[in-house]
Amino acid sequence: MFPVIIVLGILLVATVAVYAIWQAQARRQALAAWAAQQGLAFAPDKVGGVDSRYPSFACLREGSNRYAYNVASGTWHARSLLAFDYHYETHSTNSKGESETSDWYFSAVVVGSAVPLKPLLIRPEGFFDKVKSLFGFEDINFESAEFSRKFFVAAPDRKWAYDVLHQRAMEFLLGSPAFSLAFDAQSVIAWRQSLFQPEEFMQALTVVHGLLDQLPEYVIKEQMAGAS
């Protein structure tokens, strides 16, 4: 009886492993096809240094053994683009005192901006954000109660947050698929804590481009003047 159970267990593990490999290959092929359709270069291999290239983006500095893979790069709608899957690992100790390693994966797109930007974080509001607000750790609130309820916003310069998130921009984000967004001085990253399907890469790109396209003219002039 026990040998049969062991054999069945081995077969189950092998089946799961084979399915995972097949699924990863199928996804890689779908992403390569999507990149080709968009006129982007595609490289499936692991690439290090993305965290160093974008040091302001905290989501790329989690854990250790960080690398990007399934990387699509090029220009999309006149802006530079880097789309990729990302891996990092964390380490913990279980109740037996044994070290355990956890692998984490998510997808992201980074879009370059010709207009100089300032740091800004916009992400879906979470439970712990609501808890923190009870202790005075409030995010930036806006005239739109719906937007303030659905999004957590933080920025060193509150005026910049209000300049970027005017009424039309808030309505745009409320009507778009939700992503976490962060600005640095020259680019915007959009990500979720999960792997994207090709259509989700397109959604993320559309959200970032839509937000950048709606920067008010006076903001663009101020930013360009400050950079000169």
Image (spheres, rainbow, N blue to C red):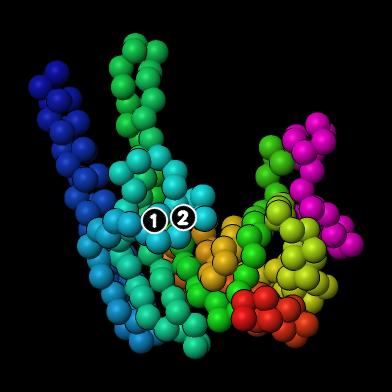
Tag 2: amino acid: Pro
Tag 1: amino acid: Ser
Image spot of residue 131 (x, y percent): 75, 34
Rendered position, 27 above or below 94: below
- Span shown in magenta: 130-151
Image spot of residue 24 (x, y percent): 27, 58
Residue 52's tag is 1
Question: Residues under labels 2 and 1: Cα distance?
Answer: 5 Å
Visible in this render: residue 226? yes
Visible in this render: residue 204? no
Quarter of the image holding residue 147?
Answer: bottom right
Q: Are marks 2 and 1 in contact (CB under 8 Å)?
A: yes
- Residue appearing at x 74%, y 65% in the figure: 160
According to the picture, the residue beneath numbered tag 2 turns out to be: 55
Magenta includes 146?
yes
- Asked whether 200 or 123 is in front, the reply is 123
Is residue 221 found left or right of 183 in the rendered image?
A: right
Is residue 5 found left or right of 224 in the rendered image?
A: left
Image spot of residue 188 (x, y percent): 55, 67
Q: Image quadrant for the N terminus?
A: top left
Image spot of residue 115 (x, y percent): 61, 79
